[in-house]
Structure formats: structure tokens, C-alpha cells
């Protein structure tokens, strides 16, 4: 492409039944365009016309030779001109051996199109036209010895070889994927799992290096663990630790020949396994609100808490229990409440200063979280505002109170109208809260996942923030209020 071409057309009058004294004109036609070349006569009625065309920018062009007799052009000969480039050097020659047939399949990137018919010839096999792969039979391979593989490509303008690949064919093996045979929690009270698997077909005799990949249900990413080098065997076993209790996991495995070129097998079919549960651990994040009934010498307590974290729940939390004492001090305690929700209301004798909160699953209860009811109420904050952040969260801002605070509680309620909050009575099912553990912080981002118990309040950006009545409070630091129109 881009070069010029020369053509010559010769006519013998005697062969074309043209009289010696008849005047003729030789013409050329390039595709649809008539051109004039250089014409001259030789002895014995021979007429010759030469032409140079180009630069040629089309991969296929038609050139015709004409004789014009009595003002009418007559085509004498037509040829097709194919233009292109010398063959590009093939890139990325890779070969993979099938461990069952022991055949070697090689693939390559042909590189830039030459626009001309190309013949590719790897050692010991010939691919079909346009095909970028070829399989070398077992009879042409010398296993456990280095061999050199390369690819020769040629067309009418030249020939080029790929970079050579030097390897023992057996090192180029790609194994069939392993099969996970069984899974088991061992020993019972640890976070370890025993995985048993079978080697891929026809690879049991090979030393292998394997990877274990696993993902907890709901997670986005897979964790990859190299589980080492294994000798020949029909069934292999490995133990891995660090799993969450009572959690569904997805498992896959892959293997490669140890010491080979690094071709991994495909991943095995996915296997699901749920780890065993154990009693919850960790403390619960709790808060409370107190209303004293002096006539009855009782205190009404609304206790609220966050769900136990997954890495502390160790399984499915069946419920939560609040008590006045713990088992360690006095046998089986009488619960103040036992619920699967994250809030409950009960009454206590006046002067009660401490209660205990526990989470439990099928394997037992967590250690009691001590909840003290005697903390001093803080001073009101002078100013409190809420503004939308995005569709599922809001920014809350406040000014520091006159007396330094140790921390803040931000509480909010969802409602269908401003009038719904005028009486100040809010059910726990449309209420949310969060703690701010520093007294010097003056803002917080309330995420959409925290809205309600268990309902969600969805915010739309760009709406106004109005003054009271209340929909957000900051006990125990004060009664500053703000209403956010959603």
C-alpha cells in the first residue's frame, strides 16, 4: 500500500484481426477511470502500451487494457491488483498442553493485518487460513525435555518468524479444575475449616500448587489464599482459619503443576458451607431514656441498642434480654424484657442505677453489657440544625454548649407531617439514634442505613430545614430541636 505499479499491454494485430493500416488507440481503465499510457509500435504489427499507476491506496484494484477502434473501446485484458504490507511479526506465542491427550495447542496474536493472504506455519502443524491457533500432536512432542517452538508467517511480500518459545511441554500443562469433596469445621470451637478435594482428571500423579478462594455471603470481594504444595494423592486436605462463626461462605479452588510455567486450572465449581455458631461476644452499644413516676415509686425506662456486629454475633441472633442481675451473681435472672427487636420499655424501682443487656443465639448468650442509668444530664446546646446531604443521609450541626460536654446522643423520628410531632410522643419503630463520643465535635453525618428501628426515612436534597416542632433531639446534652421536611 502506498507504492506505485507498472503495467504493460501488448497487442498483435494479426491475432486480433486488425488491419495493418487501421489506426488504433490503446487505453487503460483503473477501476472506473479511463487513463492513457505510453503507446508505441514494434515491427510486424505489434502495439505496446505502458502505464505507471499509484500511489495505490486500495487493497484491491482492477486494471483493464482496452483498444479503441472506430471510436469504440474494446476490453482486451483485465487483472486484479492486490496491495498490502509484509507480514507482521506474530506476538504473544503461548502453548498449553492438555494433560489427558498430551497434545499441545499454541495460540498467537497475528499483529497488524497485511491485507494479503498469509500462511502461518508453527513447528509440526499448519493452521487453517485465518486461524490463530494450531494443535501439535503428542507424537511430535518430547516430554520432560526442553523444546523450541516458533511460528513462521509469510505472504507474497516477505516472511517473518515469531520470538521462540523454549519450554518442556509438560511444564506448559493446564490441569483440569479440582473438585471440592467435603468441608468441615475442625475443631468445633475454633474459626477453622478443613477442606478436602480431589485432583483434576489425569493429574493425580502430579505435584501441585493450589489456591483457595472464598467469599462470605453478601460480600463483594473474594479472598485468595495460597494453600501450598501438595504431593501425589487422590484426595487432599488443608485447614484454614479466620472465618466468621455462623456465616455462609462460597468456596472455589484452582491448581497448577508445581514448578511449571504457571498455567492455573479453571476455578472449580462453587461449594457453599455455613460455619458453626458459638455464643455471641462483645459489648452492645446501648442508650436509654428515663421517665420517673414518683406517685408509683417507679421509673419507666426505654432501652435502645444497636444490633450486634456480625463479627461478634457468631451466628443468627435470636433475641436480646435485659435483666437486673447476671447469672454469675444469682442463678437464672428474671428478664426485664426479652425481644428480637432493638428496643424495649419496662419499669424499675426508683433508685435503680444499673441493668444488664445480653444478646443470645442458639449456642448461648453474650457477656452482659452493663448499662448505667445514673449519668448526669448535660446542658442544652444553643443551636442545632439539620440539612440534607444526599437521598439517604443528612448533616447535623450544633454549637457547643456553655458547659463542656463528654459526648452527645442524636435522636430522630420520622413523621408524615409537622403536626405528628406536636405532642412529643414518638413510637420506637419510627425512631433512630446515634452516639457522638467526643464533646468537642459539632457535626455528624447521619447515614440512611441508620434511619429508624427498623423503618428507613429517605431524604430528598434541596428541601428547607424548618424551626421546631421537634424531630431531632440531643439528650442528654439538651433540648435543641430541628425539623427536616422530607
Image (tube, rainbow, N blue to C red):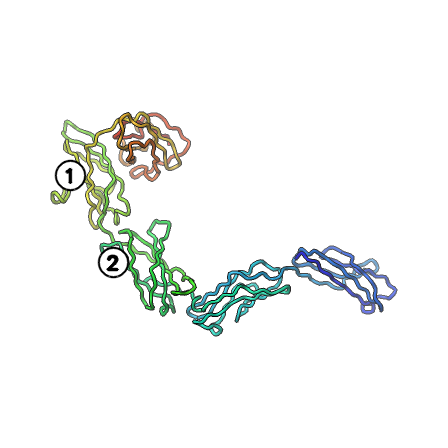
Mark 1 secondary-structure assignment:
loop
Q: Is residue 417 visible?
A: no
Return the residue found at the far left. 330
- Which quadrant holds residue 73? bottom right
**Picture residue at 19% right of the left edge, 32% below the top:** 374
User: Would residue 445 be found to the left or right of residue 347 on screen?
Assistant: right
User: Would residue 146 be found to the left or right of residue 449 on screen?
Assistant: right
**Picture residue at 56% right of the left edge, 66% below the top:** 152
Look at mark 2 in the image and give the residue it sits on: 186
**Picture residue at 49% right of the left edge, 65% below the top:** 165
Mark 2 secondary-structure assignment:
loop
Q: Which mark is residue 324?
A: 1
Question: Residue 138 at what x, y percent from top left?
Answer: 46, 72
- Which quadrant holds residue 199? bottom left
Question: Residue 246 at what x, y percent from top left?
Answer: 27, 51
Residue 451 vs residue 443, the one in the foreground: 443
Amino acid at each position: 500500500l502506498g507504492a506505485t505499479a507498472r503495467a504493460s499491454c501488448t497487442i498483435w494485430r494479426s491475432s486480433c484481426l486488425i488491419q495493418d493500416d487501421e489506426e488504433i488507440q490503446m487505453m487503460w481503465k483503473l477501476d472506473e477511470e479511463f487513463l492513457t499510457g505510453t503507446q508505441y509500435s514494434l515491427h510486424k504489427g505489434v502495439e505496446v502500451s505502458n502505464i505507471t499507476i499509484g500511489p495505490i491506496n486500495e487493497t484491491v484494484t482492477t486494471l483493464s487494457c482496452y483498444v479503441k477502434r472506430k471510436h469504440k473501446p474494446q476490453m482486451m485484458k483485465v487483472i486484479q491488483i492486490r496491495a498490502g504490507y509484509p507480514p507482521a511479526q506474530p506476538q504473544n506465542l503461548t502453548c498449553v498442553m492438555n494433560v489427558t491427550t498430551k497434545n499441545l495447542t499454541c495460540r498467537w496474536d497475528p499483529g497488524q493485518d497485511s491485507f494479503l493472504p498469509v500462511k502461518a506455519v508453527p513447528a509440526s502443524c499448519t493452521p487453517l487460513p485465518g486461524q490463530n491457533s494450531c494443535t501439535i500432536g503428542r507424537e511430535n512432542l518430547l516430554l520432560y525435555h526442553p523444546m523450541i517452538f516458533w511460528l513462521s508467517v509469510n505472504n507474497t511480500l516477505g516472511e517473518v518468524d515469531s520470538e521462540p518459545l523454549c519450554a518442556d511441554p509438560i511444564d506448559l500443562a493446564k490441569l483440569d479444575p479440582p473438585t471440592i469433596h467435603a468441608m468441615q469445621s475442625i475443631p468445633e470451637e475454633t474459626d477453622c475449616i478443613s477442606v478436602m478435594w480431589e485432583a483434576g482428571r489425569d493429574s493425580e500423579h502430579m505435584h501441585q500448587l493450589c489456591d483457595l478462594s472464598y467469599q462470605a455471603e453478601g460480600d463483594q470481594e473474594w479472598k485468595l489464599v495460597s494453600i501450598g504444595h501438595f504431593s501425589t494423592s487422590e484426595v487432599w486436605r488443608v485447614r484454614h482459619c479466620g472465618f466468621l462463626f455462623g456465616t455462609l461462605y462460597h468456596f472455589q479452588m484452582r491448581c497448577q503443576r508445581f514448578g511449571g510455567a504457571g498455567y492455573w486450572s479453571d476455578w472449580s465449581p462453587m461449594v457453599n458451607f455455613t460455619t458453626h455458631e458459638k455464643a455471641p461476644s462483645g459489648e452492645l452499644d446501648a442508650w436509654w431514656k428515663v421517665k420517673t413516676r414518683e406517685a408509683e415509686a417507679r421509673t419507666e425506662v426505654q432501652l435502645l441498642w444497636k444490633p450486634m456486629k456480625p463479627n461478634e454475633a457468631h451466628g443468627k441472633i435470636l433475641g436480646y434480654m435485659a435483666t437486673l442481675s447476671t447469672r454469675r451473681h444469682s442463678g437464672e435472672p428474671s428478664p426485664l424484657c426479652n425481644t428480637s427487636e432493638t428496643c424495649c420499655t419496662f419499669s424499675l424501682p426508683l433508685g435503680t442505677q444499673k441493668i444488664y443487656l445480653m444478646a443470645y443465639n442458639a449456642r448461648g448468650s453474650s457477656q452482659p453489657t452493663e448499662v448505667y442509668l445514673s449519668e448526669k444530664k448535660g446542658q442544652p446546646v444553643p443551636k442545632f440544625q439539620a440539612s440534607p446531604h444526599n437521598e439517604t443521609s443528612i448533616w447535623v450541626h450544633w454549637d457547643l454548649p456553655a458547659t463542656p460536654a463528654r459526648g452527645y446522643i442524636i435522636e430522630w423520628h420520622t413523621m408524615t407531617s409537622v403536626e405528628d410531632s406536636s405532642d412529643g410522643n414518638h413510637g420506637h419503630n419510627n425512631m433512630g439514634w446515634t452516639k457522638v463520643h467526643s464533646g468537642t465535635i459539632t457535626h455528624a453525618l447521619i447515614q440512611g442505613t441508620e434511619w429508624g428501628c427498623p423503618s428507613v426515612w429517605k431524604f430528598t436534597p434541596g428541601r428547607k430545614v424548618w424551626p421546631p416542632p421537634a424531630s431531632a433531639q440531643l439528650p442528654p446534652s439538651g433540648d435543641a430541636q430541628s425539623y427536616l421536611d422530607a
